[in-house]
C-alpha cells in the first residue's frame, strides 16, 4: 500500500507539491498523470526515497519512508524513464549484482533472470556490456532489475521509453498480473490511452495539487465521460491547448 498524507515539496520559491494526499491499495494500478511541471516526477522521486520533502508523511507497505528507508527499499521496485545503469557491466553481471544487493538466492535469481530475459526478448544480450545496448534493451534490463526481488510496491515512471510494440504488450500483461497478485502499482505516464487501458484508479495532478482522484469505474459510470483524454483536456481550465495551423506554419 502507498499512503501519502499532506505532502509538500518546494524548490526554493517554486512549490512542486502542495499538501497532497492519496492512497493506493494492494491490487490497484493507479494512473498518475499531469502536464509537464505538475509534480509527477517529484512525487515519484519522493516515493522511491531519492528526494526529501518539506512536510507530510509517506508510508510504503506500512513503513515510514523517513524512519524506515531500508525497509521501504526492500519491498519496492522502481522503473525510471531514463535508467542510470553501470555501462561497463554486462547484463548478466548487472542483474547478478542487483540480486546480491537484494539477497536473492542463486537458484531463484537464475530462474528469474532467465525467465525475464526470455519474456522480454533480450536473452542474446546477456553477455553484452550495458553501455552497448539499445535504449529499448536498457529499459528491459531495468524493468527486470526492478522486479527480480518480487516487490510489493512498484513505481513506473514513463516505463515504455524505447520499447518496441511487442515489449509494450508484454509489459502491459506483466502489470496486470502484478496487480492480480496484490501488488501496489503507481504508473506515471503522458500516454493517456495506456493509462486508461491498465488503470483501476486515476489521479490527475496540476500545479502541485491533486485535482482528480477517482476509480476508473466511477469515471466510466459518469454519463458525461467519453475518454480519459477528453476528461484531461476538459479540466485544464488554466491551460490553453493549442491547435496546429498547417497553412500558417508551412504556407
Image (tube, helix red, strand yellow):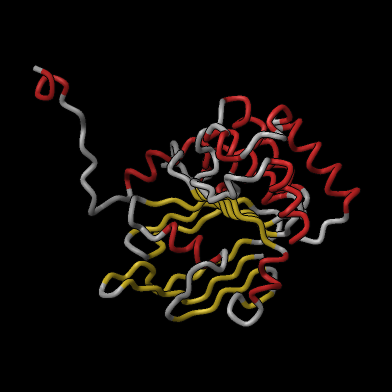
* Image quadrant containing the C terminus: top left
Coordinates of residue 103 in the picture (x, y in percent): 81, 61
Q: Quadrant of residue 129?
A: top right
Work out whether residue 174 can be spotted.
Answer: yes
* Image quadrant containing the N terminus: bottom right
Judge by depth and name the residue closer to the eye, 134 or 164: 134
Q: Quadrant of residue 16?
A: bottom left
Coordinates of residue 84 in the picture (x, y in percent): 53, 51
Furthest residue in direction right, as rendered: 107
Work out whether residue 218 can be spotted.
Answer: no
Name above or below for residue 229 compared with residue 44: above
Residue 2 in the figure: left or right of residue 246:
right
Residue 108 in the figure: left or right of residue 215:
right
Name above or below for residue 15 compared with residue 98: below
Name above or below for residue 68 compared with residue 120: below
Residue 115 in the figure: left or right of residue 55:
right
Residue drawn at x 39%, y 52% as measured from the top left: 34
Furthest residue in direction front, as rendered: 88
Residue drawn at x 71%, y 50% as measured from the top left: 147
Picture mark count? 0
Coordinates of residue 87 in the picture (x, y in percent): 57, 45
Residue drawn at x 25%, y 74% as measured from the top left: 13
Coordinates of residue 195 in the picture (x, y in percent): 52, 42
Judge by depth and name the residue closer to the eye, 8 or 234: 8
Furthest residue in direction top, as rendered: 251
Residue drawn at x 47%, y 63% as measured from the top left: 43
Amino acid at each position: 500500500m502507498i499512503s501519502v498524507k499532506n505532502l509538500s515539496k518546494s524548490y526554493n520559491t517554486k512549490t512542486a507539491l502542495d499538501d497532497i494526499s492519496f492512497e493506493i491499495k494492494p491490487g490497484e494500478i493507479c494512473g498518475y498523470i499531469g502536464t509537464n511541471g505538475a509534480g509527477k516526477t517529484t512525487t515519484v522521486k519522493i516515493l522511491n526515497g531519492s528526494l526529501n520533502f518539506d512536510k507530510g508523511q509517506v508510508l510504503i507497505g506500512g513503513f515510514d519512508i523517513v524512519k524506515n528507508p531500508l525497509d521501504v527499499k526492500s519491498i519496492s521496485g522502481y522503473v525510471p524513464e531514463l535508467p542510470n545503469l553501470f555501462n561497463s557491466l554486462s547484463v548478466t553481471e548487472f542483474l547478478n549484482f542487483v540480486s546480491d544487493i537484494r539477497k536473492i538466492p542463486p537458484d531463484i535469481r537464475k530462474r528469474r533472470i532467465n525467465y525475464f530475459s526470455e519474456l522480454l526478448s533480450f536473452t542474446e544480450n546477456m553477455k553484452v556490456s550495458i553501455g552497448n545496448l539499445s535504449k529499448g534493451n536498457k529499459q528491459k534490463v531495468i524493468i527486470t532489475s526492478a522486479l527480480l526481488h518480487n516487490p510489493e510496491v512498484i513505481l513506473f515512471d514513463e516505463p515504455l521509453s524505447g520499447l518496441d510494440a511487442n515489449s509494450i504488450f508484454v509489459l502491459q500483461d506483466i502489470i496486470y498480473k502484478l496487480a492480480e497478485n496484490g501488488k501496489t502499482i503507481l504508473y506515471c505516464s503522458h500516454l493517456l490511452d495506456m493509462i486508461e487501458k491498465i488503470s483501476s484508479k486515476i489521479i490527475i495532478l496540476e500545479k502541485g495539487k491533486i485535482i482528480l482522484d477517482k476509480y476508473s469505474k466511477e469515471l466510466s459510470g459518469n454519463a458525461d465521460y467519453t475518454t480519459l483524454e477528453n476528461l484531461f483536456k476538459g479540466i485544464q481550465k488554466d491551460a490553453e491547448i493549442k491547435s496546429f495551423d498547417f497553412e500558417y506554419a508551412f504556407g
